[in-house]
């Protein structure tokens, strides 16, 4: 079994479609290995994949590398190691990531430039449940523990978003749903691709000359989801 660092937090038909899509994505990742798998969702909404077969260990490692993995409670975190959690909330104090347990990244450990965490969220187009890599500082109560911080690779990824032609980030929708929405709104020619960030978190990469806020206004009425532009 491997618990992936991505969530399925929608309900009803949307949940069924998301899990069908997740099953296909797992097949793309490990379908050539000698394994069988079952995709499910834990009570905390993290996606769980049960894997059996001769190549089960290899398959679990591939899935963990592709999606990130949530650490089992009986394993615990190791100070100085990099993990993945989902962005659950933010306030003046910093970010709260869900990595199987809450991990608080202080505002001065975000490493994403000046401004309050709320401003960082707006500037980088961050949406709730976005998978993000962080470095675990140490256990609460340990006097020698360092604060948790965003991983260098995570900071680099977000800065790269700002250097490109523009992005519109979306949550609560699959990649196929976002693509279909852009097409339905008549803006297929205004994007380069839809990049998958998590199961239900996507990044629409704009074509040169496309204004991300304008794209948001054009497709917003078609897609009931949280959307933010990368500024």
Image: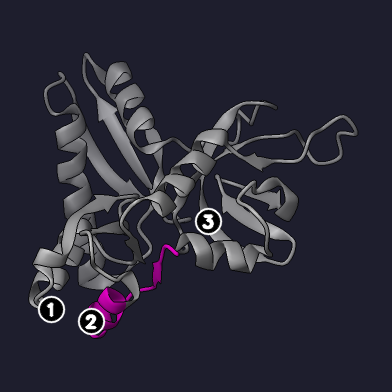
Q: Quadrant of residue 229?
A: bottom left
Looking at the image, which residue is at 63% across and 56% down? 96
Q: Element type at marker 2?
A: helix
Q: Is residue 46 above or below residue 26?
A: below
N-term mark: 3 or 2: 3
Q: Nearer the viewer, residue 113 or 150?
A: 113
| Marks 3, 2: nearer the viewer | 2
Provide the residue span drawn in magenta. Answer: 214-231
Q: Circles 3 and 2: CB distance less than 8 Å? A: no
Dot 1 and dot 2 residues touching (CB under 8 Å): yes
Against 18, residue 35 (above or below) is above
Along the horizontal axis of the image, is 15 left or right of 70?
left
Q: Position of residue 49 (x, y in %)?
A: 31, 38
Closer to the camera, 134 or 47? 134
Query: Which residue is found at the position 38% from the left and 63% from the top?
Result: 9
Residue at the farthest front position:
209
Q: In which quadrant is the C terminus drawn?
A: bottom left
Residue on which disc 1 sits: 185
Image quadrant in which you'd find residue 60: top left
Mark 3 crowdedness (10 Å alpha carbons): few <14, some 14-19, many ≥20: many
Q: CA distance from mark 1 to mark 2?
A: 7 Å
- 224 falls in the magenta region: yes
Kindly identify which numbered label has been placed on residue 218: 2
Instruction: Name the disc covering residue 8, or none.
Output: none
Going from N to C along the chain, the mark reached first, 1 or 2, is 1
């Amino acid at each position: 079994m491997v618990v992936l660092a991505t969530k399925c937090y929608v309900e009803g038909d949307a949940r069924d479609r998301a899990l069908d899509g997740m099953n296909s994505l797992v097949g793309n990742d490990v379908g050539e290995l000698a394994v069988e798998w079952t995709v499910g969702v834990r009570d905390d909404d993290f996606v769980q994949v049960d894997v059996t077969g001769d190549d089960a260990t290899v398959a679990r490692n591939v899935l963990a590398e592709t999606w990130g993995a949530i650490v089992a409670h009986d394993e615990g975190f190791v100070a100085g190691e990099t993990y993945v959690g989902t962005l659950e909330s933010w306030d003046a104090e910093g970010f709260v990531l869900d990595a199987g347990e809450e991990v608080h990244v202080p505002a001065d450990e975000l490493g994403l430039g000046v401004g309050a965490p709320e401003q960082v969220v707006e500037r980088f187009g961050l949406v709730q449940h976005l998978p993000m890599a962080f470095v675990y500082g140490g256990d609460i109560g340990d006097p020698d523990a360092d604060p948790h911080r965003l991983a260098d690779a995570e900071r680099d990824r977000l800065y790269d978003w700002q250097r490109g032609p523009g992005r519109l980030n979306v949550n609560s929708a699959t990649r196929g749903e976002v693509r279909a929405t852009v097409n339905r709104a008549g803006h297929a020619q205004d994007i380069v691709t839809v990049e998958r960030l998590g199961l239900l978190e996507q990044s629409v990469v704009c074509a040169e000359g496309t204004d991300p806020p304008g794209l948001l206004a054009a497709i917003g009425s078609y897609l009931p989801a949280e959307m933010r532009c990368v500024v």
